[in-house]
Amino acid sequence: MPRVFKYNDQVFQDPGEEWSVEDIKKSLAQTFPEIAQATVNEKTLDDGTVEVTFVKRSGTKGMQDPPLKTTGRKHNHAEAFCLMRYTCERCQHSEIYWNSRDGVTPFMCRCPACEEGNMVHSNWRQDQYAPDHIPTPGQGVWIDMPESLRRPVAAGRVKSFDGSEYELQGDERTDMIKHLTDAMFHPGEPWLIHWPGRNEEP
């Protein structure tokens, strides 16, 4: 079942069903320490998506609301066209990714270095607005998921459960792929690419 996570007017994409709500809470607390003491509210939206909202407990000693990111740039999302640092929780590999669009970005993604850990959007308050940025060869760039990839990505997510107790067959499999395509991998969903070319080093 697709999930979406919310905190302080920000929306975070689901990194995968293998991540429990508590796992995601702990990960987000690295950027937003006050989340460690937050309560969790869940509700199911009309399209079947589970909306998980982290709510800061009022009156918690020593906890302060993080400063709101106000762009003043006539964008719909604070992270629009920003350079952001992602750091692997496992191997500490770190890279600067660029959000090339006015859209949300995941707070974590798979680490390209160790291929086992997850890169977490770290130092959130240090994101740099760079609408004219030219990516360097190999740099990670968030784009809108191409329409032609929505169904293949959804099918891949379903296939990842083959061989487990959650494997689906027949009409159930077809229906789940359609549901994920429509409800989770919708137009505007973030998709990570690495800029083509290579660095010319002596």
Image: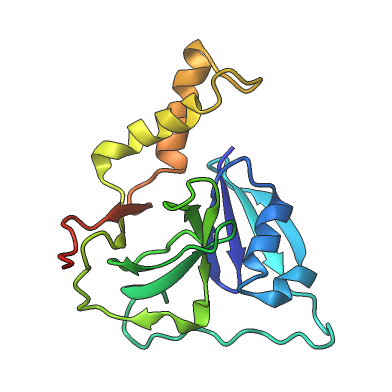
Q: Would residue 182 appear left or right of 193 to someone viewing this image?
A: right
Residue in front for this viewpoint, 98 or 149: 98
Percent across and percent down for residue 82 are 35, 75
Is 199 positioned to the left or the right of 185 in the image? left
Task: Give the residue displayed 38% in from the left and 36% down from the top.
Answer: 153
Question: Which quadrant of the figure has residue 132?
Answer: bottom left
| Residue 162 sits above or below residue 105 on the image | above
Query: Of 168 and 43, which appears nearest the observer?
Result: 168
Residue displayed at 79% across by 75% down: 57
Residue 140, image x and y in percent? 32, 60
The reply to whether residue 76 is visible in this rendering is no
135 versus 172 height, above or below: below
State the image coordinates of residue 71 (x, y, percent, origin top left). 39, 85
Residue drawn at 42 percent across, 34 percent down: 154
Any part of residue 134 in sight: yes
Q: Position of residue 123 (x, y in %)?
A: 52, 77
Q: How is the image coloured?
A: rainbow
Query: Residue at position x 33%, y 76% from top?
Result: 75
